[in-house]
Image (spheres, helix red, strand yellow):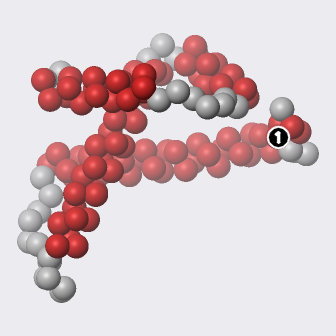
Amino acid sequence: MNVEERDQLLKFLASLRQVPVASKDLLAESLIQEALGSQKDALYQLVQRCLALELALGAAQTRLKEYETQPDGVQADAKPSDWGLGLMKQVGTLAVGTTLGVVAGQLIVDNLLPDGDWLDQ
């Protein structure tokens, strides 16, 4: 880990410590704890993914601002760097994985509790 990566991680972790949770969904908390307990590197991977998405969002916002400041119809000829291409690939993979996870999770919940009983908890 280089100094910049360390600083980004420390900033991200500090933001987690500063924001209190107003209320928790007990089912969600239980599922999260179960997942974290069943895979020793789950928390590490979760922080890595969240930080990657945060960095991707920042890069996208910067790119959008650059685009908005250009005269109409003029496109910048700059090509994305290897880092930018890799980051976008990572984000795309995460987006597909997250979408599939949400769909699969909903199917599991629908099959386990088809009447929506879990909503009453």
Quadrant in which the N terminus is drawn: top left
Percent of width and height locating residue 32: 61, 25
**86 displayed left or right of 70:** right
Looking at the rendered structure, the secondary structure element under dot 1 is helix
* Residue 42, x across and y down, in percent: 47, 21
Q: Is residue 99 above or below residue 40?
A: below
Give the total number of marks visible in the rendering: 1
Q: Residue furthest left?
A: 77
Left or right: residue 18 compared with residue 117: left
Q: Which of 115 and 10 is in front in this view?
A: 10
Q: What residue is shown at x 72% (from left), y 26% (from top)?
A: 26
Q: Where is residue 17 in the image (x, y as percent from the top left)?
A: 42, 22
Question: Which residue lies at the image location 28% right of the left edge and 28% below the top edge?
Answer: 11
- The kind of residue tagged 1 is Leu
Q: In this view, does 66 lie above or below 108?
A: below
Can residue 103 be seen in the rendering of this structure? yes
The quadrant where residue 15 appears: top left
**Residue on which the image places disc 1:** 119
The C terminus is located in which quarter?
A: top right
Q: Which of 67 and 117 is in front in this view?
A: 67
Residue under the point 22% across and 65% down: 65
Outermost residue to the bottom: 73
Nearer to us in this view, 114 or 16:
16
Residue 45 shows in the view: no
Badge 1 crowding class, 10 Å Cα cut-off, few under 14, some 14 to 19, many 20 or more, is: few
Of residue 105 and residue 24, the one placed in the foreground of this image is 24
Q: Who's the residue at 13% across and 23% down the image?
A: 2
In screen coordinates, is 96 left or right of 84? Answer: right
Image quarter of residue 53: top left
